[in-house]
Amino acid sequence: PLGDEKLNTLSRALHHATFAAEEVIIQEGEVGDNFYMIYSGTVRCLKRESDVVAADEQYRQRSEGSHFEHEIFLCNLKTADFFGELALMDNAKRAATVVAN
C-alpha cells in the first residue's frame, strides 16, 4: 500500500475528465502521456487487426464493438479499472485504442 505522503502527491496530480460516448480517449500507436482511472462509466479496448494473432477466422472479420473497420474488441473496463499505464511505464506508444461507451 501507498503511504499518506505518496497518496497526497498522487492525488495532486489527478485531473477530472469527461468523455462522450464513442469518443476516442487514447489511440493505439500514439505517444502516451496520461494514465486514466475510471470514476464512472465504461470503456472498450480495441487492437488493430494486423497486430492480433487470430487462429479462428471469425476474429479476422470485424469484431462486434469495434470502433474502426480493422480493429478487434479486446475487453470492456468499468468503474475503478485503469488504463494507459503501460505507455508511461515503458516509455512506449499506446498498445491499444480505448473508446468511451
Image (cartoon, helix red, strand yellow):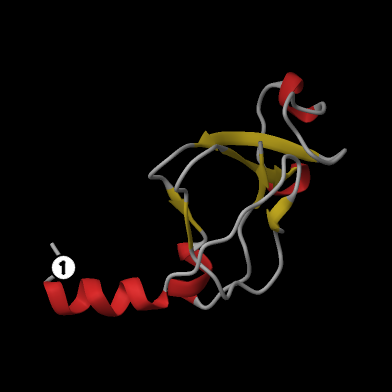
Residue 86 image offset from top left, x and y in percent? 48, 64
Type of the residue with mark 1: Leu
Residue 41 image offset from top left, x and y in percent? 53, 38
The one of 41 and 67 positioned closer to us in this rendering: 41
As drawn, which residue projects farthest toward the right? Answer: 69
On screen, residue 71 versus residue 45, left or right, reads right
Instruction: Give the quarter of the figure containing the C terminus.
Output: top right
Q: Is residue 51 above or below residue 57?
A: below
Secondary structure state at the residue bearing disc 1: loop
Residue 50 image offset from top left, x and y in percent? 77, 46
Residue lying at 55% horizontally and 37% vertically, measured from the top left: 42
Residue lying at 57% horizontally and 73% vertically, measured from the top left: 92
On screen, residue 10 versus residue 76, left or right, reads left
Q: Is residue 47 above or below residue 89?
A: above
Residue 25 image offset from top left, x and y in percent? 67, 56
The one of 32 and 9 positioned closer to us in this rendering: 9
Residue lying at 52% horizontally and 78% vertically, measured from the top left: 91
Instruction: Name the residue that disc number 1 marks.
Output: 2
Q: Is residue 55 above or below residue 28?
A: above
